Image (cartoon, coloured by chain):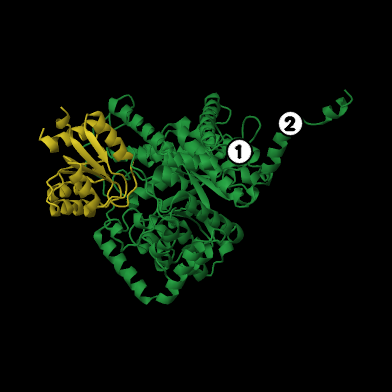
Amino acid sequence: MAEDRIRVVLAKLGLDGHDRGIKVVARMLRDAGMEVIYLGLRQTADTIVAAAEQEDADVIGLSMHNAGHLTLAPAMLGALRAADLDIPLVVGGIVPDDDAAGLEEAGVAAVLGPGATAEEVVATIRRVVRGE
Amino acid sequence: MSNDDSSHADPSPADRARERWQAAYDRSARRDVPFETMSGVPVEPVYGDAPYPGQYPFTRGLHAGGYRSRLWTMRMFAGFGTAEDTNLRFKELLRAGGTGLSTAFDMPTLMGRDSDSPWALGEVGRAGVAVDTLADMEDLFAGIDLGGVSTSMTINGPAATLLAMYVAVGENHGVARVELAGTIQNDILKEYQAQKEYIYPPRPSMRIITDMVRFTTAEMPKWHPVSISGYHIREAGSTAAQELAFTLANGFAYVEAAIAAGQDVDEFGRRLSFFFNSHVDFFEEIGKFRAARRIWARWMKERYGATDERATMCRFHTQTAGVSLTAQQPEVNIARVATQALAAALGGTQSLHTDSFDEALALPSEKAARIALRTQQVVAHETGVANVADPLGGAPYVEWMTDEMERRAEAIFEHLDEMGDGSILEGVYAGIDNGYFVGEIADSAYRFEREVNSGRRIVVGVNAFTDGNDDSEPNLLRIDQATEDYQRKRLDGVKHRRDQERVGAALARIAADAAEPATNLMPAIIDAVKAHATEEEVADAMREVFGTYVEKAIV
């Protein structure tokens, strides 16, 4: 069973310090049986890529509350591509609907907006990792 | 027995309290409005027993006349894009009847980074206004009479630099330091606990704050050098009692630090102010506000020896709870904000920011910000709650809730006092270091989330009454990438025009003064910003000496 546990790397990219949401999500995913590696605040795309590689992550989750998602999420996708890593990226936080569509087109696997419930968060992670 | 005659002649303590209240009330200012109900029934300025509003320990409010003398200040927090953009919003808010300015800075500014830093990518002007140099600060306050408004600046890590810039803008406008009125948040302790916008480790940060307290005490008598803020602690997930206790404990910590630095508790105690959250549980919030005043007054007098009553008064600003706003059916947030604003008024706040209904989705649009201001104008001018001071005082449930909030806070103070071996300051440092605060806050946040997810706690539009959730989003404020590009060009221009030698010398002086604990850093920082040193350059000069703070990632 252990090898089936989904490994999630969670991080705050950039200067944004709002970490209530990501900490709650970390506990939700843990309660759902996933392995959660929370990198903490003030990560860069490079530190996240390195951690995802080292931790053999199945999925990366970023939380954004400062309206920087249209710049930061593509930067993260670019860093993953440059490192030749095929790990799905999920973005959560304050992301308006219009932006969510654009981010998904750009290659973000899923966007979890401010109204997402615990069930949606867990189901979304399972879906992007396993296609469930 | 021999005193019988004189004791008959003396009024009772209750009568004396009433007389003192009456005298204070008669001396106080009066708004020119009828103090009667909408049906024409005249109402008294206060009901109930001693201690009255304006009397120690101020549970019932700081002023004998409550809001009869003066309404709370309607202080709307604003900031986005470039300094020019925010300047226009400021002028709009002043025209709409706002009476104080409150500045939100963008993330790079809050973290001591310039707009051209790699860290600033995607964040310039997004969640507040970008300020890199004095030139931006000049634009921010262009055409605004700094001698006539009070300005609040929400900034902590680099607060000394922004205060220095404000002083410099004042000088350029011909407004002397003694005339500048306002507040700078400058509450670094809650950054390590909740908001996470720190630069240096706690102890050197505390030294900078002590320098600012000294500077403003000597030169800026109308300035509040620290606004001790529970708002962010609550937003990060704490309970009401934790917000109350952590905030006041941080206040005690600043008091202990200032006393240790040789400051007079009566002198600086008068100019401390607080900032609380007004959340959605109506009576719990009112009890919290009333308890805050009582606890602060008692501790300042009994533990820290304040003798000037003004130094024992807990003055506070309130903001409605951003975290209570829902992305679902966002217009419903207007109702939440209205009840929270009412709780703040009934709790006796000195100033109030009401959140905009669209803030779960984006920064407030102009229309949403105007509705938010209108909401507090309805509370102030239509509901009649401002006619009577502490109108809920004496109600059994309200008094019980006030006592209960106090009991819960006292239990937390006891724990911190133990962790600090008899010093709250050391207890707070220890709690930052050992993860006590972040752990307690995260536990409370998770408990709340589980209650909502299980349906035990109803949040309208989230887990109940969801018809209408599919309506399209309201028009949101957008900050485009052009802002970032524009601001970088602007910064580049300032860097090219300035006298580099003067900047270098000013920065070297900051580093040298930082290494001398007895030297006040403010004069060197003022000098540097006048030379158009950037915010990040000033921060770097101190990073060299103080180091930086990195939080352990704990879930």
Helix, strand or loop under label 2: helix
Task: Note whether B347 is above or below B522 in the view shown.
Answer: above
The numbered mark, 2 or 1, whose residue comes first in the sequence reads 2
Q: Residue at x 48, y 59 (%)?
A: B160
Looking at the rendered image, the disc whose residue lies closer to the viewer, 2 or 1, is 1
Q: Can you tell which chain is drawn yellow? A: A
> Picture quarter containing residue B103?
bottom left
Residue at the disc numbered 2: B13
Asked if badge 2 and badge 1 are on a common chain, one would say: yes
Residue A76 visible from this viewpoint: yes
Q: Residues within 10 Å of mark 1 (few under 14, many from 20)?
A: some
CA gap, disc 2 and disc 1: 23 Å
Q: Residue furthest left?
A: A131
Task: Note whether B115 is above or below B37 in the view shown.
Answer: below
Q: Residues within 10 Å of mark 2 (few under 14, many from 20)?
A: few
> Picture quarter containing residue A18?
top left
Residue at the disc numbered 1: B299
Q: Is residue B555 left or right of residue B101?
A: left
Give whichever of B447, B223 is nearer the camera. B447
Find chain B in the image and tell me its colour. green
> Picture quarter containing residue B396?
top right
Task: Note whether B304 is above or below B532 in the view shown.
Answer: above
Q: How many marks?
A: 2
- On residue B541, the disc is none
Q: Amino acid at mark 2?
A: Pro
Residue B211: x, y in percent?
Answer: 54, 57
Q: Residue at x 72, y 37 (%)?
A: B19
Give whichever of A118, B22 is nearer the camera. A118
Residue B70 visible from this viewpoint: no
Residue B542: x, y in percent?
Answer: 44, 60
Residue A26: x, y in percent?
Answer: 27, 36
Q: Amino acid at mark 1?
A: Trp
